[in-house]
Each structure stands twice: as structure tokens, then as C-alpha cells.
Image (cartoon, helix red, strand yellow):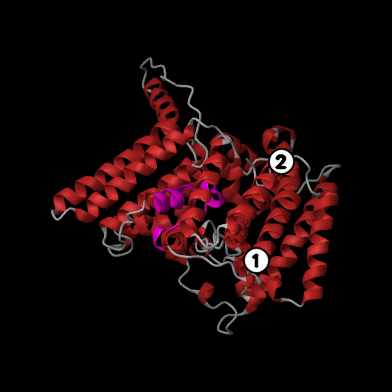
Amino acid sequence: MLFNSRTFLLFFAAVYPVHLALRRNRRAQNVALLLASLVFYGFWDWRFLGLLAASSGIDFFTAQKIHDSPAPKRRKAFLVLSLVSNLSILGFFKYFNFFAESTAALLRTVGLHATAPTLSILLPVGISFYTFQAMSYCIDVYRGELEPTRSPLDYALFIAFFPHLVAGPIQRPRVLLPQMANERKVTWDQVNAGLFLIVWGFVKKVLIGDNMAGLANPIFDHFRDHRGLDVILGALAFTLQIYADFSGYSDIARGLSKLLGFELLVNFRLPYFALNPTDFWQRWHVSLSSWLRDYLYIPLGGSRGSSKATYRNLVLTMLLGGLWHGAAWNFVLWGTYHGALLVLYRLLDRNPEHLEPWSGKFSRGRVLAKMALMFALTVVGWVFFRSRSAGQAVEMFSRMGFGVSEGTRDLAGTIGFFASPLLAMELWQYRTGDLLVLTRARPWVLGLAYGAMLTALLIFGVRDSVEFIYFQF
């Protein structure tokens, strides 16, 4: 069930009045939301409801055992049980064929005959997101940073809550679980912000992201038919597509949650205004990057050891972050590329402009130049991400140049047309430091903005319900 579908609109139109009618009874609200979430997830494939229930049940049980066990070894044993269970399920469904085929290919390179034992495995939607969320719950309990909930209902809703279930943001238990356990009251500020996030999320996805997909896909899918500036513009179109698509989903998820009385983590903070890789990962897919920092990079040693150890930890964390996105070498290359950027910037650039770029301590030209460079490096990374193989990425880079074709002007004009509302809104948000700045505008300004956005969606929005990119992860 896609957010950008009539089915979901009917679904939410049925769920929301029930949720409001039960506002005086938190437990009844949670039951209704859990049932709605199971219907939402089962709409994709009802067979995976059992997998979701099994994963949730294991972590609910092990977290209580971790908390109640006095012996450190026993606590660690239950933590290992949780981690092994989660990673085994994730590994089987997402990575079995990848590692089997990669191992067989490696054996063939050394002269050994090998055939990969592949299986026809359907990837459960959202498995990477809810698995990481469940793991953080048990780890936090083990660390003594969180009391385990004793309510199976609250925990099940924490995992299955439909706005974030299939594509995040990955929620921290310390943030969302208390909201499940306490009374909720929907305020006008939440409704105001929620409506803006939903409408703006649809503009990002349906108006910008899906139209950019129509430009990027032909170039990436038939890259040998293109060269020169067209290839660069194709990479730029995908750069805008993936951001508009994924941040659009996150905005809609946050907006729906606000209407229901919940607050989800902000997942994007204007990432294409970043000045360096560290700044970028504090702005892009924040729920994943902060998860990797807290549960992988820091336990590996973080920056506490030697410089070489720090660089190793950075590259390994980003490599695994790339692999999180999918069982393919292009994601491994993309993650390694970003790990290398983090290391290079630590070696070559020690000026923290991103902490206070416009304070007057640094020249505007320098700040803008660093912003442009980081954006260009990000575009390069997206070529690795979108390509189906390392060979395709290399060939696409070799085909880039400043030669033009008959369609170059139209391609550039179309990108500029659909990118302009995104640039205008984000410049306003960036200058004010407020992602919800439009909601604080005068009523007539807000009305004109909503009218313009809805009109643009009706006239230029893609009619088909196109799946969000991150559903595949």
C-alpha cells in the first residue's frame, strides 16, 4: 500500500476518525493503530506478518531477560540471541543469494568449478528498517539506557507503526516507546505541521521525484546510448530523484504521525547544502547514519584510538552502511566511496565551516565553493549507487563530458523546471534554519502556497503510483 495511492488515502480516511474517536482511551487507540498497521503491512504480502511477529516477539522476550538477569554472562547471552536472530533473518532474506553468487564467482576465478545455490527469495518490505529498530531496543536495554516495556501491545506498535514501518525513519526506542505508553493529545501545531509535511512530501515525491525518474531512468538503463553533458544531467536528475523520493516519504510519514499525535525523528536536514562528508551524514538519512554511529562506529572504537584505527572504523562503518542498502556490489562501492571521502576530508580539510558557516569567520566564497564541491562529490557517489555494476559506473564516468545532443537543452530545461520549487523552498528553510518555516507564515501566504502546490500536483504530478525507492531496502 503506497502513500501515493488511492488505496492508502481510503485506508487513512477510515483509520483517522476511529483514532480520534478513541482519543480518551490510549489502550484502545493502540489496539486500533496496531490492527491498522498489520492491515497496512499485510497488504504487501500477508505471509510476512508472521515474520514481523516472530522478530518482534523474540526481541520483546530477550529484552526483558536482559534486564532481569543479574549475571553479566547471562545478559550478554540474551543480547547475542537477539542479535543473531535478527541478523540471521535479515541475512537470509536479503543477502543469501548475493553471498552465494559472490563466493561461486570467486571460486571460478581460481579455477574451481562452482555453481551458486540460489533460492527464489522474496524480500520482505521494510525488513532492514524494522530489524535495525528492534536491535537498537535490545542493545539499549543491555546498556542500561532503557527500561524494557512490559506491554506487548506498546512494543508491537512501536515496531509495526504504519507511517514508519516500511521505509523509516528508523525510530529510537527512547523516543517513540514512551509515546506509545503515554496519553496523547493532538495539538493545532501538530495538525498545522502535519498537513504541511504531507503536502510537501507529495510535492517532493509525485511532482519532483517521479518526474526526475522519467529523465534519469532512460539514461542509466541505456547508458551506452548517451554521452557528454546528457550523462551528467542524467546523474543530476537521479541525485534530485532519490532525495525528493526518500525525503518525501519521510515527510509524509512524519506528517501522518503528527496527525495521530506522535513525533518521529527528522530524517533529512537539507543534505545538499552540506559542506563536507561529516556534514552530509548529519543531514542525510539521519536515522540510519546516527544508528550506524551509535551502534557500530563507536563500539568499533570510533575516533578514540590512533588515526589509522579511526580511518578503518570510518571506512568499515560506511561499507556496511552501503551493504545495508542492498545485496549488490554497487552499494558496497558507494559505501566505501563515502568512507574514503570521510577519511580524505579528515586528512586534508580541518576547517569546521559547517558548524557556523555564515558567522563571518569564513568568506562566503569559500563556503559556497565547499558546498558546490561536496554536492559534486555526492553526485559522483549517486552514479555508483544507481548503476547496476561497477563496470556501468566506470563507463558512465568515461562518457561524461561537455558535448551536447539535440535533446540536451530540453533535458536541462526540464530538470530546472521541476527542481525550482525544491530549491526555492529549501533556500527559505536554509536561510531561516527552520524546516517548518512555511507553517509560521501569514494565513494568506500559507493559503497561496498550498494552492500553488496542489495545482502543480494536479497539472504536472505523475499520475501513476510509483513505488518509493527505499521500499527495496
Q: Which residues are magenta?
A: 153-174
Q: The disc labelled 2 sits on which kind of residue? A: Ser
- Compared with 309, 371 (above or below) is below
Residue 465's disc is: 2
Q: Does the magenta-highlighted stretch encompass residue 144?
A: no
Tell me where residue 408 appears, x and y as whole percent.
Answer: 82, 46
Give the Cα separation between the discs numbered 1 and 2: 25 Å
Q: Residue at x 77, y 61 (%)?
A: 421
Tell me where residue 383 appears, x and y as whole percent.
Answer: 60, 45
- Image quadrant where one finds the N terminus: top right
Q: Which residue is mark 1?
A: 191
- Viewer-closest of 468 and 321: 468
- Compared with 297, 81 (above or below) is above
Indicate the secondary structure of the residue bearing disc 2.
Answer: loop
- Viewer-closest of 289 and 144: 144
Quadrant assignment, res 252: bottom right
Please, what is the dominant secondary structure of the magenta stretch? helix
